[in-house]
Amino acid sequence: MEVRRATFEQVNNWQLDFLFGETGITILEQKQETIHPDSRKDFFDLFAKSLLGKGLDYEYKLTYNGNTYNMGSLSIFARKMAYMTDTEDKKQPLKLKGKTIRIPIKHLWEALRENMYKPMDEALTMALKISAEIFKNTGGSHEFNPEKKQ
């Protein structure tokens, strides 16, 4: 088995793909869709790469109707989401505080995205350390001007 070290750029690209790719969680949230069974393996793989395995270190917290629920490990709950099936009303039944509550899948994807910001940042920092990359400051400045062509 070959072991390779992820670079900052690779981790950043995985994260962008996980969030904004063709089947990323932003699209799933907008379309209020669940993950197709044929895509589960890809979801698991991209989730793991995006966080460099740090998902167990963070909690998945869901705020819905003014209540905040701790759903446990971010990693475990995200993988459970991969097995949710589409429903006519686009809601998923979850047992919360002893009651079954139907939560719109859109809110679950939104909460996943919100809960991933900190571990994603940690994964990027870790990728810099493990790949021993060095960013050189070229002394130039950067402009964010949509009308300026490179």
Image (spheres, helix red, strand yellow):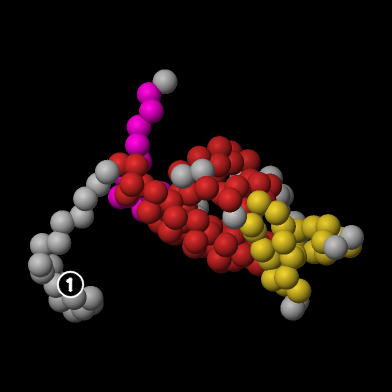
> How many tags in the picture?
1
Name the spot of residue 39 as percent of width and height, x first: 56, 42
- Within-10-Å neighbours for mark 1: few <14, some 14–19, many 20+: few
Residue furthest left as drawn: 139
Residue 13 belongs to magenta span: yes
Q: Is residue 61 left or right of residue 135?
A: right
Range drawn in magenta = 2-14
Residue 86 belongs to magenta span: no
Name the spot of residue 57 as percent of width and height, x first: 58, 51
Name the image quarter holding the N terminus. top left
Residue at the disc numbered 1 = 142
Residue depicted at 15% across the width and 61% down the height: 137
Residue depicted at 33% across the width and 47% down the height: 129
Above or below 106: residue 47: above
Decide which of 36, 123 is in the foreground and name it.
Answer: 123
Q: Which amino acid does label 1 sit on?
A: His
Quarter holding residue 114: bottom right
Above or below 23: residue 32: below
Residue depicted at 60% across the width and 47% down the height: 56
Q: Is residue 144 visible?
A: yes
Name the spot of residue 20 as percent of width and height, x first: 44, 59
Q: Is residue 32 visible?
A: no
